Image: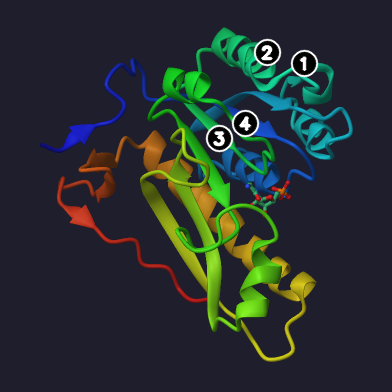
Amino acid sequence: MARLIQPNIKDSMKTISVVISGRGSNLEALLNAVQAGHLKARVARVIANRADAGGLAIAAQHGVPTTVIESKKYQDRAAFDAALAMALDADQPDLIVLAGFMRILGESIVKQFNHRMINIHPALLPSYPGVDTHQRALADGVKWHGCTVHFVTPKVDVGPIIGQSVVPVREGDTEAILAARVLKAEHRLLVDCVRWFCEERLVIKDDKVLLRNAETSFDAYQNPVG
Ligand code: GAR
């Protein structure tokens, strides 16, 4: 049976927490969308696991509170995850967005935020999980590459896929050129997927995500090729 994945949400304005490790361009895309009124949500907090994450300054420019939980200061994964879970819980977010978060989370925190935590990955999953996705795609000579937004499960880069965006791989592409093309697609895809979540349009059925439209039928996500 199809199941709505946001069963306990009280009001229409969703609260989002964003977790980052670095530059923060996906975070910026979300904050710009909120500011422009394209995303009806409140970003409650940005949490970084590195003090030098560029996204912290972007959050501050948008007036969003930030918290740094430096993973290198924690003895093990479980201790870091517990600190992160406590910080996230304090804001009671409806949705947690991993936007360039470069750490693996353990089963406990993932289960705690089941169906409330999404991740953006720079490849067309299940192809190229892990790191160096653009380099590996170029080495394989694939003609199409892209990005994926998915619900987070205990398996790394595995989980119900919310949306994907496809870009061509062109002759002469370097890793940097391809990464820039994918990143542009990421920004749009992430905003779309977060909007669908906030509009309560996502339904998980048999570990697959269906997108409801206003008439409660289901659309396939159509994205123009970048
Ligand atoms: C993005 O390309 C994102 O897909 C990737 O890190 C980059 C972060 O950029 N995430 C992962 O690789 C997660 N495994 P940003 O900090 O500018 O958003």
Earlier in the chain: of badge 3 and badge 2, it is 2
Tell me the residue at 63%/66% (across/down).
Answer: 182
Q: Amino acid at mark 1?
A: Gln
Residue 97, label in figure? 3
Q: Residues within 10 Å of mark 3 (few under 14, many from 20)?
A: many
Q: Is 182 or 142 nearer to us in this picture?
A: 142
* Left or right of residue 6: residue 15: right
Q: Are marks 1 and 2 in contact (CB under 8 Å)?
A: yes
Quarter assignment of residue 98: top right
Q: Which residue is mark 2?
A: 79
Q: Amino acid at mark 3?
A: Val
Q: Going by the image, does 196 lie left or right of 107?
A: left
Percent of width and height locating residue 37: 54, 41
- Is mark 3 in CB contact (under 8 Å) with mark 2? no
Please report contact status of discs 4 and 3: CB closer than 8 Å, yes or no.
Answer: yes
Residue nearest the observer in this picture, 59 or 181: 181
Q: Is residue 94 above or below residue 198?
A: above
Is label 1's Cβ within 8 Å of ligand 1? no
In front: mark 1 or mark 4?
1
Locate residue 174, reporting x and y percent.
Answer: 77, 79
Residue denoted by label 1: 75
